[in-house]
Amino acid sequence: MGEKLLVMGLGYVGLPVAALARRKGFSVLGYDRESDKVAAIADGRFSAGDALVRETFREIPLDATTDQECLARAGVIIVTVPTPLDHDAHPDLGPIRSAVEAVARHARPGVLLSIESTVNPGVCEECIVPLLQKHGRDPEHGDVFLVHCPERVNPGDARWTVQNIPRVLGGHTPEATERGMALYTRLVDAPVRRLSSIRAAEAVKIVENAFRDVNIAFVNELAQSFDRLGIDVTEVIEGAATKPFAFLPHYPGAGVGGHCIPVDPYYLIEHAQTKGFEHKFLKLARAINKSMPRYTVERLKEALRRAHDTTIQRISPAADIASARRAPGGGDMPSPLEGVPVALLGLAYKRDVADLRESPALEIEKILCAEGATVSTFDPFVPERSTAQTLADALRSAVAVVLATDHTAFRNLAPAHLAGTAIRVLVDGRNCLNHQAFRAAGFTILGIGR
Ligand code: SAJ
């Protein structure tokens, strides 16, 4: 067997890396601090998402352990632990620190240490290097060869995989960079770009995801504007996308979730703040995207109002809408969602995945409940978190539908599916439904920007 390569952190990033390394001839070890994760790997139980992982470890399971002593057996250690945000959107480097301390304590001299977890520029030099040195290790003169090669795993993407996505790499020392380049040009079947520094490599990942966040915020702001202007933003985006250069389409929706896009910009915002710079634009983009769950609920209220007015117009055109809305005793009106049964379709943060992290759908659910709506939820990828176990069950007692995740199973939702229910109103949070068909069938349907 080849050189021993150990992956620290056996989640949606680490497992594909471990599988790829096995395929490229390394003798692969896995380490995770969670025993239930290690036990699942030993039993060959993997998340549905990654075919490479299942196929690679089906015959011979990954040799995974919670014992940090295993670190001493590897010539290469790849760290793929999470870098989440804490409750007030500050980067939580706890998992990285724990992993690096374990490496410092157990790894043998000359180990190549690659950090793949997303970190802000400066973390390797200002946090990891001092941590290694504090534990008596020397990343300057060949005791530990430290590099950063940011992960680019795209969950649920069968086309771009850990094997064929190009990478960038920066090293703490020239020799570390060369060793890192030798490793990743062997591991990945795609170009690996050598960068001049480790912090340049840290910045690349943050920038590529902040780029996506601001572009989504741009179209989310357009959507709110175009809802007032009576313009279909999707049509305009598709029109702009006919220009073969200098335009990259992004699409408005119920919000921005996941482990990358809503998280990574805060790494740069926070770090730049410590150096006296305020990223006003990144913060504004984050604020716009974070407002979209609330905007989606406001669209529901607007749709209910329009349906209500249409009903009144149909039943008694002279009816005084204001009086119909005044609460008994003339007090303040309760939320128009009070007691309204709503079917929330989709809980995961994006199409056809089971991942709930930072999911805007969960924020929508929270807002609906806070406004007194009676919410039934259904997500075929997250049955354990759904209140209804089938789409029909979720729709049965609802008068309104909010689609928060454009799972393939929902994209063909048609008026016929709502026959026999009291549903009259829909909000299409991912602009994926056939609005014309629903309107023709007498439904009130609103999208986000259309
Ligand atoms: N979203 C929009 N409008 C868009 C695109 C996405 O509202 O035009 C929303 C999605 O609904 C989701 C969130 O943003 O809630 C994130 O979606 P995403 O497609 O960016 O999915 P992620 O979080 O899995 O992002 C990953 C990232 N990959 C890595 O970090 C290695 C990201 O860089 C990729 O651009 C993205 O996949 C991708 O292209 O699919």
Image (cartoon, helix red, strand yellow):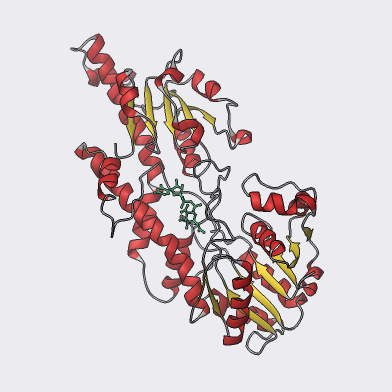
Does residue 63 sit above or below 72 in this rendering? Answer: above
**x and y, in percent, of residue 398 in the image:** 46, 21
Left or right, residue 230 beside residue 379: left
Which residue is situated farthest in the top direction here?
315
**x and y, in percent, of residue 377 in the image:** 53, 30
**x and y, in percent, of residue 359 in the image:** 50, 45
Q: How many dots with numbers?
A: 0
Does residue 442 sit above or below 432 in this rendering? Answer: above
What residue is drawn where x is 76% and y is 76%? 105
What residue is drawn where x is 49% and y is 44%? 350
Image quadrant in which you'd find residue 184: bottom right
Does residue 196 sit above or below 209 in this rendering? Answer: below
**x and y, in percent, of residue 282 in the image:** 37, 61
Q: Is residue 332 visible?
A: no
Q: Quadrant of the N terminus?
A: bottom right
Image quadrant in which you'd find residue 432: top left
Left or right, residue 258 beside residue 113: left
Q: Is residue 181 visible?
A: yes
Which residue is situated farthest in the left direction here?
318
Q: Quadrant of the C terminus?
A: top left
Which residue is situated farthest in the bottom direction here?
141
Left or right, residue 367 beside residue 143: left
